[in-house]
Image: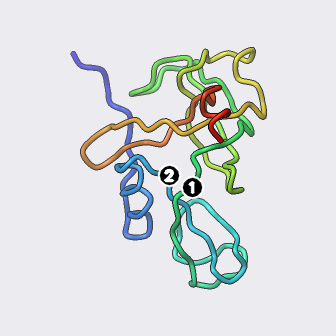
Amino acid sequence: MTAPKRPLPQPTPETAHFWNGTLEGELRLQRCTSCEESYFPPRPFCPSCGTRDVEVYPASGRARLYSYVINHRAMPGFESPYAIAVVELEEGPRMMTNIVECPQTPEALVLDMELEVAFQTMSDEITLPLFKPRSPAAETSE
């Protein structure tokens, strides 16, 4: 018997740019051209000022761990325990995600730890942006 698969998001016309970006290994955000506020999740208008004058741009992929909970209950497509996290992107918006390539313990998951995006291909249509601890090589190359 095969293990149940992780539920996957269903792209919409409003989120297509985001999911197309993840397929290409790029984290894409939107920014208001009027008030210059960056935001997530994708939507066709600025949540700060309401204008529809928005643009899509590639984000750095860098973030800090803002909050998390370690889930120990079995869920389809997840190996327990796993962190359900909120990261604060370098550009400002916060994103819910999972932390990978790191022990799923309070000792390892330190608030404000530096992270970088790690893409996980789930299907031909969906690649998920997960986050892992930022490598020291990435910090010295900035």
Element marked by disc 1: loop
Give the percent coordinates (x, y) of residue 99: 58, 29
Query: How is the rendered protein coloured?
Result: rainbow
Which circle marks residue 17 in the picture?
none
Splitting the image into 4 quarters, where does residue 139 fall?
top right
The circle on residue 59 is 1
In the rendered view, would you say 107 is above or below 55?
above
Vertical relation: 125 (above or below) 140: below
Residues tagged 1 and 2 counted as in contact (Cβ below 8 A): yes
Type of amino acid at the residue the image marks with label 2: Leu
Tell me the CA gap for discs 1 and 2: 5 Å
Circle 1 packing at 10 Å, graded few (<14), some (14-19), many (20+), is some
Q: Is residue 119 left or right of residue 90?
A: left
Residue at horizontal 41%, vertical 64%?
17
The residue wearing badge 2 is 27
**Which residue is depicted at the point 78% across and 31% down?**
111
| Residue located at (59% from left, 50% from top) | 60
> Residue 79 location in percent, x, y?
46, 19
Q: Nearer the viewer, residue 73 or 21?
A: 21
The residue furthest left is 1
125 on left or right of 139: left
